[in-house]
Image (cartoon, rainbow, N blue to C red):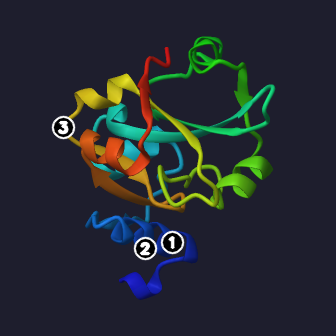
Amino acid sequence: MAGEWSPSVRRVQEEILARGLAFEILELKASTRTAQEAAQAVGCQVAQIVKSLIFKGAHSGEPILILASGSNRVNEKKVGEIIGEPIGKADADFVKEKTGFSIGGVPPLAHRERLRTYIDETLLGHPCLWAAAGTPNAVFRLTPSDLLRITEGRVISIQ
């Protein structure tokens, strides 16, 4: 029930509703912290899991959100060339400060600040996707077009 949700999950749900959408958030007993755990918990392929990864611009210090397929790794050098600045993985404190969420539960929306967002092109090849909803055991289902709409991210090759 929504009244029993953590503040993080409530924040994601409120943002979803504010955008006129109606994604159902599932809070599971099983962990969804990793892409593999999330796929097992919801019964989908690992490739259908949206990993919300926060990187830090090497020159700007700006947070950069990469929404990657659960089966893919980010080629930091290639992505840096695409976006015009080298990137490095952000630490847990930076992620929490910039998004308001802890690693393992970062959703693709409802962050503390607007993030420059890039979407792994391979996510667009699936009929449905699953993304974190604010905690390491909360997820929601959406389509690739929903992901594009809620993030206004730029589609790129991350590998």
Residue 50, percent from left and from top? 42, 40
Q: Within 10 angstroms of label 1, few (less than 14), some, or many (20 or more) residues? A: some
Q: Which residue is mark 1?
A: 11
- From the viewer's perspective, is 12 left or right of 75? left
Q: Within 10 angstroms of label 2, few (less than 14), some, or many (20 or more) residues? A: some
- From the viewer's perspective, is 51 left or right of 45? right
Residue 32, percent from left and from top? 47, 52
Given this view, does label 2 or label 3 mark the residue nearer the observer?
Answer: 2
Q: Are marks 1 and 3 in contact (CB under 8 Å)?
A: no
Q: Which residue is mark 3?
A: 127
The quarter of the picture where residue 116 lies is top right
Residue 156, percent from left and from top? 44, 21
Determine the residue positioned at 43% across, 73% down. Answer: 14
The quarter of the picture where residue 56 lies is top right
Q: Which residue is mark 2?
A: 14
Question: What separation in Å lies between label 2 and label 3 (alpha carbons)?
Answer: 25 Å
Q: Within 10 angstroms of label 3, few (less than 14), some, or many (20 or more) residues? A: few
Q: Are marks 1 and 2 in contact (CB under 8 Å)?
A: yes
Question: What separation in Å lies between label 1 and label 3 (alpha carbons)?
Answer: 26 Å
How many numbered circles does the render carry? 3
70 or 109: nearer the viewer? 109
Q: Secondary structure at mark 3?
A: loop
Type of amino acid at the residue the image marks with label 3: Pro
